Image (cartoon, rainbow, N blue to C red):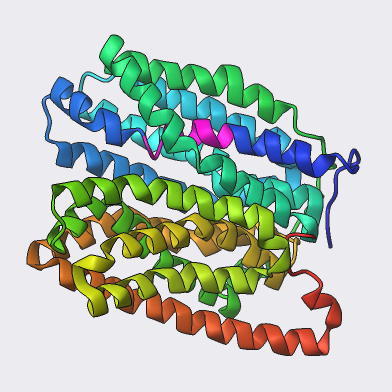
């Protein structure tokens, strides 16, 4: 069953894309991308090591993953207009506490609260909101959301750096807190209204059985495993890329060039997705995304240092398409019913793995860069095998039910 807005009309997809996409720049810029600029000054100000700072940041990622199913369930029932502004308030509260932090416990508490806010404001919540309004036709909006978020680092890093240089790290954090309250929250409050989805009152043993079946659905677990494997590659490789490339033999100039190329490759893949994605279904786009990293590592093994830039470009393509895949592929298989809650369960392992993967990759880099890319290639290969199994299932279901295959593509 699909739950659509009363105000749905021909202009809704574009309007919804803007209202969900623009706040993503603020959410990612004030959360995931904040440590790249402020980890050093905040650590110095509190008299702690950067390792402690990043453990606090890791806590926020873990919190975001653990509360994801409940956030998704709330959006399934009430819609994003009533849920996502709460995320902006919580996000702003966490950032405000961070700006006032004078003790390490305050920093940990701030990141934990920020993680709660991120769970209500970033990708999965936005995707669930799009599906809540458009059902199986949400793919173009999902693609647009990922395009907006692709500019988050390009906008937030220079802006945060300027505020740090001209004022202080506290001022930079206060600025992002204000952006949540005065920009992102009003945009979320302008989302179309939806009717509240009534949930039958179920209690006792029956409720426990329903929850258990939902969590342990085999297909849901396969999706969770695929995205956990991909989360290891996306976050682990991206966050350690300069050290990794240097360990592969690149000189300083090539390391710098590789770091610069990664971001544009991600954005370009999302631009191309918007332009030509209507000719491809979610399964095909998932294949491109998942095969990109193993292919890049294979080129490294064959051509050595001369293939480093191609490796980085392919990494960027895979990372760039990954958010769309994680939003559209479950929609293709499960439909829009309880999309948000199911998406929360699917992405929970991925977020936990993503939180820990930089540490794991760093440990491998201590041994050798070749070990790190070999392991990441194996992880990507496992994800690809699982995707092939899903593709087989997809073809069989399409043969039995022609309407199932009609859900593919951005034109929907």
Tell me residue 4's x, y (percent).
Answer: 85, 49
Residue occupying the far top of the picture: 167
Q: Residue at x 13, y 60 (%)?
A: 247
Q: Which residues are magenta?
A: 23-33
Tell me residue 366's x, y (percent).
Answer: 9, 61
The quadrant of the picture occupied by the N terminus is bottom right
On screen, residue 223 versus residue 233, left or right, reads: right
Relative depth, front residue between 210 and 91:
91
Relative depth, front residue between 15 and 94:
15
Relative depth, front residue between 149 and 8:
149
Q: How many marks?
A: 0
On screen, residue 142 versus residue 137, left or right, reads: left
Relative depth, front residue between 17 and 6:
17
Q: Quadrant of residue 203?
A: bottom right
Tell me residue 387's x, y (percent).
Answer: 53, 79
Q: Residue at x 68, y 82 (%)?
A: 394
Q: Residue at x 85, y 42 (%)?
A: 195
On screen, residue 138 versus residue 64, left or right, reads: right
- Any part of residue 200 in sight: no
Q: Quadrant of residue 60?
A: top left
Q: What secondary structure is the stretch in magenta mostly built from?
A: helix
Q: Residue at x 16, y 57 (%)?
A: 250
Q: Is residue 406 above or below residue 321?
A: below
């Amino acid at each position: 069953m699909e739950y659509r807005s009363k105000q749905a009309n021909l202009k809704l997809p574009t309007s919804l894309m803007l209202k969900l996409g623009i706040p993503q720049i603020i959410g990612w810029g004030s959360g995931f991308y904040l440590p790249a600029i402020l980890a050093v000054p905040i650590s110095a100000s509190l008299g702690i090591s950067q390792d402690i700072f990043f453990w606090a940041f890791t806590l926020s990622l873990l919190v975001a993953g653990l509360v994801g199913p409940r956030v998704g369930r709330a959006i399934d029932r009430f819609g994003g207009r009533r849920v996502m502004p709460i995320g902006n308030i919580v996000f702003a509260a966490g950032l405000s506490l961070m700006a006032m932090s004078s003790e390490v416990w305050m920093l940990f508490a701030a990141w934990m609260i920020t993680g709660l806010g991120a769970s209500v404001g970033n990708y999965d919540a936005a995707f669930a909101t799009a599906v809540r309004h458009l059902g199986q036709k949400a793919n173009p909006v999902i693609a647009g959301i990922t395009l907006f978020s692709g500019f988050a680092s390009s906008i937030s890093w220079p802006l945060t750096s300027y505020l740090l240089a001209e004022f202080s790290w506290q001022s930079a954090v206060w600025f992002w807190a204000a952006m949540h309250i005065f920009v992102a929250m009003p945009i979320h409050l302008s989302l179309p209204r939806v009717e509240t989805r009534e949930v039958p009152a179920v209690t006792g043993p029956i409720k426990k059985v329903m929850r258990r079946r939902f969590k342990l659905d085999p297909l849901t677990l396969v999706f969770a495993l695929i995205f956990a494997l991909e989360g290891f590659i996306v976050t682990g490789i991206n966050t350690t890329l300069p050290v990794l490339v240097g360990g592969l033999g690149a000189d300083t100039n090539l390391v710098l060039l590789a770091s610069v190329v990664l971001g544009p490759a991600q954005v370009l893949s999302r631009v191309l997705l918007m332009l030509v994605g209507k000719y491809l279904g979610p399964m095909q786009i998932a294949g491109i995304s998942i095969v990109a990293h193993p292919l890049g590592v294979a080129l490294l093994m064959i051509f050595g240092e001369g293939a480093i830039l191609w490796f980085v470009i392919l990494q960027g393509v895979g990372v760039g398409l990954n958010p769309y895949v994680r939003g559209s592929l479950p929609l293709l298989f499960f439909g829009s019913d309880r999309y948000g809650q199911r998406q929360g369960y699917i992405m929970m392992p991925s977020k936990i793995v993503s939180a820990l993967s930089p540490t794991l990759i760093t440990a491998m880099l201590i041994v050798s860069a070749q070990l790190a890319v070999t392991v990441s290639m194996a992880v990507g290969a496992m994800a690809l095998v699982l995707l092939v199994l899903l593709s087989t299932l997809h073809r069989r279901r399409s043969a039995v039910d022609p309407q199932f295959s009609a859900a593919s593509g951005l034109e929907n």
